[in-house]
Amino acid sequence: MLVRRGLSYRQRGFTLLELLVVIAIIAMLIALLLPSVQQAREAARKTQCLNNLMQIGVAFRNYQNQHSVLPPGCINSVGPVRSLESKIDEQTPVVTDPGYRVGWIPQLLPFLGQEGVYQQIDFNIPQLSFSEPQVRADYLQHLQKWNEYQQSLKTVPEAISPEAEVLTEAVPEESTDDAMGMSDSGDPLQYDPKQGPPTLPTLSPLSVPRVPGLLCPSDPTSTTGKSSYAGVHHSVEKPIDTDSNGLLYLNSSESLDTIPDGAATTLLAGELKLSGDSQVWFHGDRGTLRNGNQLGSSGRQNVQESGLVGAYANMTDEERLQRMLEQQLRVGTFSSFHSYEVSFVYADGSAKFMSRQIAPVVLEQLINRHDVLDSKPGEF
């Protein structure tokens, strides 16, 4: 038997240099492939966004077939409609009473396949929409007490005797807990109508349901109760009121079949982005209505972000209130999270992308229902 000595056997593996070369090649392939993947994903998101607008156009047509007119852009007793999130600084707070202000989206929900969300809307007291049953019951009970109290003031003259005045002076001051509406045990006190009318809940992006068909897939804030789409209000910057030249405005009642400009050459709705804003799809304000202007501009100067609060600190109270009112009346134009393009749906139901470089005068003509174009528009 022969024994082979001096021979060593070892398994050969990758050297460090070979491993680094392989990693470098894989990294180069990923770098070459990643832009194509991102472009493919963005193309899919744009297609979905365009499809959302087409569905909104179909819903508008179905609404008109049932009601003979388009839904009003906003329903309110008075105008112009203000955006209530605007403020100058902490000394000039936001107005918290939104009024009625029901927009066009709540009226369109049954035609968007959102009957469940539609059933949660209270069209008599909009602020009670999406509230818990107990919250609604408590408010209605407190409102009844407030109305009875107001009626009693009208029927019974208020007279205080000298004895009552002495008793009133002898009553000790309320504790801090009582002033806040809490008893010593921490339980809520019964509503007292003498303190004023009951407070309505506030509709915020967190309290309003998320409606998938109203959200652009490219919008990073699409998990909140906002809308990525707004109706056309006016051809140039203008507060939301009853005398606008778009198809959706305050208490509007336009029809798709009687547009002077023609349905094929009139815009109905388009994209917008509301990052950081507090508007919800429920109201008919700048969160669901937009004007014509250079696409992509915000249309509203955020005073706090621009660093001009110090200049406003020297204003009088009247000047500060006037500046806040101007901010609240700003509406703004359409914009999107897509690169270089904003999607729109026309009154005839066709949806198309529009370049952000479009001339403002052309956009004004497409929004103005009275401004007749010579031919049907193509891709801009």
Image: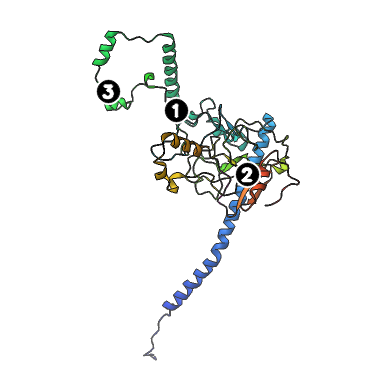
Q: Secondary structure at mark 2?
A: helix
Examine the structure image and report whether residue 334 is included in the region drawn in magenta. Answer: yes
Using a 10 Å C-alpha cutoff, classify the residue at mark 2 as few (fewer than 14 neighbours), some (14 to 19) or many (20 or more).
many
Q: Position of residue 350 (x, y in %)?
A: 69, 45
**Which residue appears at 45% of the width and 22% of the height?**
140
- Amino acid type at image mark 2: Leu
- Which disc number belongs to residue 200? 1
Q: Earlier in the sequence, mark 2 or mark 3?
A: 2
Q: Residue 39: x and y, percent?
A: 58, 59
Q: What amino acid type should be assigned to the residue bearing mark 3?
A: Glu
Q: Residue furthest bottom?
A: 2
Say if residue 182 shows up in the picture.
no
For the residues bearing labels 2 and 3, Cβ distance under 8 angstroms: no
> Disc 3 marks which residue?
174
Colour style of the rendered protein structure: rainbow
Q: CB atoms at circles 1 and 3 under 8 Å apart? A: no
Q: CA distance from mark 1 to mark 2?
A: 33 Å
Q: Dominant secondary structure of the magenta stretch?
A: loop
* Alpha carbons under labels 1 and 3: distance apart: 25 Å
Nearest the viewer among 325 and 202 is 325
Q: Are marks 1 and 2 in contact (CB under 8 Å)?
A: no
Q: Is residue 32 magenta-colored?
A: no
Residue under label 2, please give it. Answer: 53
Please report the bounds of the magenta region as a residue range.
Answer: 331-337
Of circles 2 and 3, the one toward us is 3
Q: Is residue 139 visible?
A: yes
Ranked by sequence position, the earlier of labels 1 and 2 is 2
The circle on residue 339 is none
Q: Secondary structure at mark 3?
A: loop
Specify whether 254 is left or right of 197: right
**Residue at x-position 45% and y-position 77%:** 18
